[in-house]
Image (tube, helix red, strand yellow):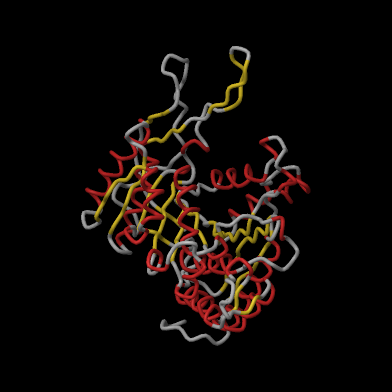
Amino acid sequence: MKISSLSLVAVLSGMNTASSFVIPSPPSLKTFTRRTTSLSMAVPKSDSYTITLLPGDGIGPEITSATKQVLGALCTRCGFEIKMNEGLIGGIAIDEKNDPFPDETLEMCRASDSVLLACIGGYKWDKNPRELRPETGLLKMRKEMGLFANLRPAKVLPQLIDASTLKREIVEGVDVMVVRELTGDVYFGEPKGIDEKDGQRVGYNNMIYYENEIERIARVAGDVASKRGGKLCSVDKANVLDVSQLWRDVVTDVISSDFPDVELSHMYVDNAAMQLIRWPKQFDTMVTGNIFGDILSDEASMLVGSLGMLPSASLGESGPGVFEPIHGSAPDIAGEDLANPLAMILSAAMMLRYDLDRGAEASILEKAVEDVLDQGLRTKDIKQEEDGCKLVGCKEMGEAVTKLVQNVDVAVEVS
C-alpha cells in the first residue's frame, strides 16, 4: 500500500528547557507533492502474488494455519495465486537468530507484495534486555518499512452485540475507524533511556513530532473520513502538551485546506477515552498520535466484544503494507486450539483490499466471517453463557470459514 504526503518543523514535550538538549534530525521522509492523499495499492491487480507470512509467537502459528487454509480456498474459487513465504519475527526470531526482526525477514518483507503478521511476544522474553524483546522487532519493522499509518476498524457485528460488556443500546451500530500515526511520538522520540542522577535512576522518553509527520497522517485520515461518514475527530492533549498544540494546528490546516467537506472536531485524549465508552456512535473516523492511538484503539476494540475479532492495516508511502490482528499472542492458551482466527482472516481481507487490489475477494472473506457467526459458531473469547451457540476451537472455526469461502454469495462481482 502506498500513501502520499509533505513538509518540516519540530516540537517536543516533557524536557526541561534548561537542560542541554539537541532536537534530533528529522525523520527521513521523501518529498511529496502537497494535496496528494490517495490510498493506492502496493501492486496492481494480478493473477499471482507473493506475500510474507509472519506467524510469530504464542497462538500465532495456529491462527496463521487457519488463515492459510482460508486463503487457499479463496484462490481456488477466484482463479488467482498467492505464494506464501514464512519469516521470523518476535520471540521465535530471538530464539533462533538472536534478533527480534532479522535482516533476512526485513528483506523478505520488502520483496513481497504484502505482509501478513499474526502476533508476537510472551512471558518468556519479558525480562530480556530491551534490544532482545519481541516488541523491539515490531517497532523496527514499522520504522524500516516506513509504516506510518495504522488503520484499526472497530465495527460491531449484529451477531456479537451481546458479547460486548456495554449495553446493547450503546454499541449497536457502532462503526469506528481509528487512524493512528505509527512511527513517531514517544515510542521513537530521542533522547531516551534510563540514567542515574543525584543518586537515583531516572527514566525519560520524548514525545516529538515534525510537521510533515503530522501532515501526512492527517491527509490519510482526511482521505479515510471522506470515504466513510465525512466526520473526523482529532485526538490530542493540546491543553498541556506543546507537541499536541502543533498536532492540532497542523491537522486543522490540512483538513480545512484539502478536505473542506470533512467535518473536523478536536477532543482531548482523556475525554475521548471516556466518550468512546459513554457514546461511541458519535465517532466515525478518529486520528491521533502513536501512544494515544495505541490506547484508544485497544479500548475501541472492546466495543465489539473481543480483541479476537479486529484486524488492522499498517501502511507506508510505498511498498507492501503489514496486516495483522490487534490481539496479542496469548501464550497462556497457545497450542490448546482455543484461539480465535477470525481477526487474522479479516486482516487477510484488508490485505486483499488495500494492497492487492482484490476488493471483491476481500468481501468474500468478510461475508464468510459474518456467515460463520450466523451459523452459531463461537470460539471461547466470544462465547456467551446460554447463547445457544456452539463452542469451537481455532481449527474448526478455520475449517468452517474455509467451507463458506468456497460458495458464499456476495453482492459484488469477482473477476
Quadrant assignment, res 380? bottom right
> Where is residue 139 drawn, in percent x and y?
58, 44
Please tell me which residue lies in front, 373 or 214. 373
Is residue 415 visible in the rendered image? The answer is no
Residue that protrudes farthest toward the right in the picture: 96
Residue name at image x 28 percent, y 57 percent:
231
Please tell me which residue lies in front, 266 or 184. 266
Disc tally is 0
> Where is residue 227 drawn, in percent x and y?
32, 64
Quadrant assignment, res 326? bottom right
> Where is residue 25 drawn, in percent x and y?
46, 29
> Where is residue 18 drawn, in percent x and y?
43, 14
Q: Is residue 291 above or below residue 50?
A: above
Is residue 40 visible in the rendered image? The answer is yes
Q: Horizontally, is 353 left or right of 345 in the view?
A: left
Please tell me which residue lies in front, 359 or 281. 281
Q: Horizontally, is 107 left or right of 2 in the view?
A: right
Residue name at image x 50 percent, y 33 percent:
189
Q: Is residue 311 above or below residue 408?
A: above
Residue that protrudes farthest toward the front in the picture: 386
